[in-house]
Image: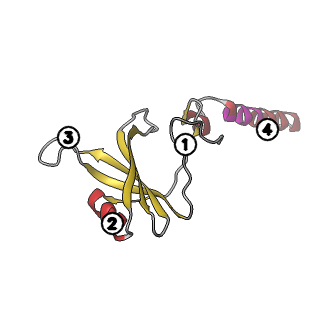
């Protein structure tokens, strides 16, 4: 094989590799939700819902905000979740919890099987009422 052919093969392989990175089928680009950006893997602590509730209670926190919502999945599904902000006003501590896997049948219908602690914090808690404009993020 001549030097010219080897150079041509290397050039073409490099060009195809660069074009593959721009392709919508490239794994780094394929798993995106329009406008939201790429999927990330984030470690999250999860357990059975009743255990996470006990952790919240043992911290002296009680739910002050709860919201029914959905989460986006890479598969395109949007399962229902409940998001809860629990607060201990004396310690100024809070926990953000996501409850998931809604039980639809039986004695526990309407309850959630699992829960994840998405975040915790301590210190001053700021919020605005929905009748006024919030802060720019």
* Residue ID at (47%, 69%): 91
- Nearer to us in this view, 125 or 83: 125
Residue that badge 2 annotates:
57
Residue 131 x, y percent position in the rendering: 52, 35
Please tell me whether mark 4 or mark 2 is closer to you in this view.
2
Looking at marks 2 and 1 on the same chain, the residue that comes earlier in the sequence is marked by 1
Residue 20 on the magenta segment: yes
Looking at marks 4 and 1 on the same chain, the residue that comes earlier in the sequence is marked by 4
Give the distance between the C-alpha atoms of the residues marked 3 and 4, in whole angstroms.
58 Å
Looking at marks 3 and 4 on the same chain, the residue that comes earlier in the sequence is marked by 4
Residue extent of the magenta highlight: 15-21
Residue that badge 1 annotates:
39
Residue that badge 4 annotates:
10
Looking at marks 2 and 3 on the same chain, the residue that comes earlier in the sequence is marked by 2
Residue that badge 3 annotates:
104
Give the distance between the C-alpha atoms of the residues marked 4 and 2, in whole angstroms.
63 Å
Q: Residues within 10 Å of mark 2 (few under 14, many from 20)?
A: some
Please tell me whether mark 1 or mark 3 is closer to you in this view.
3
Give the distance between the C-alpha atoms of the residues marked 4 and 1, in whole angstroms.
32 Å
The reply to whether callout 4 and callout 1 are in contact (CB within 8 Å) is: no
* Residue ID at (43%, 60%): 87
Give the distance between the C-alpha atoms of the residues marked 1 and 3, in whole angstroms.
29 Å
């Amino acid at each position: 094989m001549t030097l010219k052919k080897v150079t041509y093969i290397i050039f073409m392989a490099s060009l195809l590799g660069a074009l593959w990175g721009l392709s919508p089928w490239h794994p780094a680009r394929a798993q995106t939700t329009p406008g939201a950006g790429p999927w990330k893997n984030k470690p999250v602590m999860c357990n059975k819902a009743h255990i996470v509730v006990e952790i919240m209670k043992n911290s002296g926190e009680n739910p002050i905000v709860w919201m029914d919502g959905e989460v986006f999945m890479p598969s395109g599904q949007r399962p229902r979740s409940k998001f809860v902000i629990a607060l201990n006003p004396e310690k100024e501590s809070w926990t953000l919890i996501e409850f998931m896997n809604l039980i639809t049948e039986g004695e526990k219908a309407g309850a959630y099987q699992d829960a994840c602690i998405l975040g915790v914090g301590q210190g001053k808690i700021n919020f605005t009422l929905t009748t006024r404009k919030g802060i720019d993020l």
